[in-house]
Amino acid sequence: MPLNVPSRHNEKLSQLLARINEDLELQQLWKCANITAVDRAGISDHGEVHIQIVANAALKMLRLLADADVETGVVKDYSLTYEDAEVIVVLAACLHDVGMAVHRDNHEQYSLMLAAPKARELLTNLYEEPERTIMVSEVLHAVIAHRWDVHCNTIEAGILKVADALDLTQGRSRIPFEAGLTNIHSVSAMAIDSVALEKGETAPIRIVITMSNSAGIFQVDELLKRKLKNSSIAPYVRVVARIEGETEKRLVEFYSISQEPQREEVVI
């Protein structure tokens, strides 16, 4: 599945997307990451569909912030452009989970190992030195900072952290639920119907989460909230979560407590 991201008039982003879609090594890393996530760990998808969702969400948030004149790290500290910031967030989105191909645990660190040479390769001839090294450094910072408890030094890194947490809808998180694992992670994941990004009135970004059941609040509170709180873009984001319909959808018919240990199913 080709990565489909609206490059608009950003020629460097357009060229980067073409290179990504021709890169068989990167595409295989996404597949390997998904084998680790879905087939071996039994958690939600972390493959090419996840990458598509995160890259598009990150780019949309960056453009909403640009419309509000929020200055990005690469513009502020290196006098580069918003177009360069778009390249950073999209490339970081494409590389943030490649470490999952090595191991689920501490995958952010493994992602750095694989992302460093790949980012430099993909940016060759798009940027000359020293700009290429600047761009690679900014991409790697965003990759490591997508872990919820790592501080974000740039707007770009904060965007990726939050975008990663927006892959929440039930169609994306139903693997543990359909496998018969009934706990707060699987049930709350099934309760999220949609996630929308909009231009806000009191803040540049408005995230609207539609739920079929109030159990979805767990996803918002435990996953999105903690990432947003530890991001660099928290002052620019408002989150609205609402239950659609007059009655809540029943997700579980019967629940009993077992002595058998259950693992965490959802990792963002």
Image (cartoon, rainbow, N blue to C red):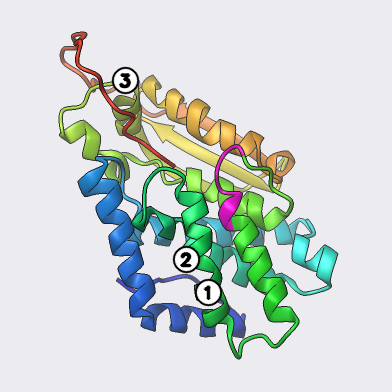
- Looking at marks 3 and 1 on the same chain, the residue that comes earlier in the sequence is marked by 1
Q: Is residue 1 above or below residue 157?
A: below
Give residue 188's position: percent from left, percent from top.
35, 27
Q: Is residue 26 above or below residue 128?
A: above
**Res 165 visible:** yes
Q: Residue shown at 55%/44% (left/top)?
A: 147
Residue tagged 1: 117
Q: CA distance from mark 2 to mark 3?
A: 44 Å
165 left or right, relative to 141 = left
Residue 145 in the magenta stretch? The answer is yes
Q: Three-letter amino acid code at disc 2? A: Leu
Under circle 1, the secondary element is helix
Q: Quadrant of the C terminus?
A: top left
Under circle 3, the secondary element is loop
To which quarter of the image does residue 201 belong?
Answer: top right
Give residue 187's position: percent from left, percent from top.
29, 25
172 left or right, relative to 92 = left
Q: CA distance from mark 2 to mark 1?
A: 6 Å
Residue tagged 3: 248
Q: Three-letter amino acid code at disc 3? A: Glu
Nearer the camera: disc 3 or disc 1: 1
105 left or right, relative to 1 = right
Q: Quadrant of the N terminus?
A: bottom left
Residue closer to the observer: 56 or 198? 56
